[in-house]
Amino acid sequence: MKSVALIVISSAIFLFTGCATRDYVKQQMEPLVERMSKIEAKQKECCEAAERAAKKCEKTFELEQHK
């Protein structure tokens, strides 16, 4: 009797908890997507700034070599 009750209760918990819906997943992922987009934009800006700085260093080095 106890095993039947345990099976019924376990089945009920399993059935009533259900799976996440697509809308719920979208709702939970939206803030993360926004944060990742901001981070990627900052990373792109930093890479571009680093490339510009490297070019300036190369030009300065070349000018110093010609002196």
Image (spheres, rainbow, N blue to C red):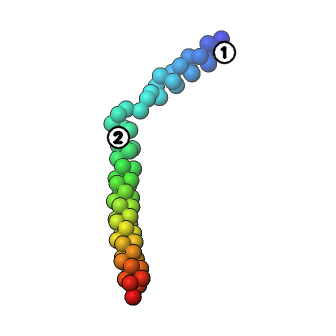
Q: Is residue 13 left or right of residue 44?
A: right
- Picture mark count: 2
Q: Is residue 31 above or below residue 51?
A: above
Q: Is residue 3 above or below residue 34?
A: above
Q: Which residue is mark 1?
A: 2
Q: Give me the residue at 35% from left, 61% from top.
A: 44
Provide residue 59's location: percent of width, then percent of height.
36, 77
Residues 58 and 46: in front is 58
| Residue furthest right in the image | 2
Q: Is residue 42 visible?
A: no
Q: Is residue 12 above or below residue 33?
A: above
Q: Amino acid at mark 2?
A: Lys
Provide residue 3's location: percent of width, then percent of height.
65, 14
Q: Amino acid at mark 1?
A: Lys
Q: Give me the residue at 66% from left, 15% from top.
A: 2
Closer to the N terminus: mark 2 or mark 1? 1
Provide residue 46's location: percent of width, then percent of height.
38, 66
- Crowd band around label 1 with a 10 angstrom C-alpha radius: few (<14), some (14–19), many (20+): few
Q: State which quadrant residue 42 falls in.
A: bottom left
Q: Secondary structure at mark 1?
A: helix
Residues 31 and 17: in front is 31
Q: Quadrant of the N terminus?
A: top right
Q: Give me the residue at 41% from left, 32% from top.
A: 20
Residue 18's label in the rendered image is none
Q: Which residue is mark 2?
A: 26
Q: Secondary structure at mark 2?
A: helix
Q: Give me the residue at 34% from left, 66% from top.
A: 48
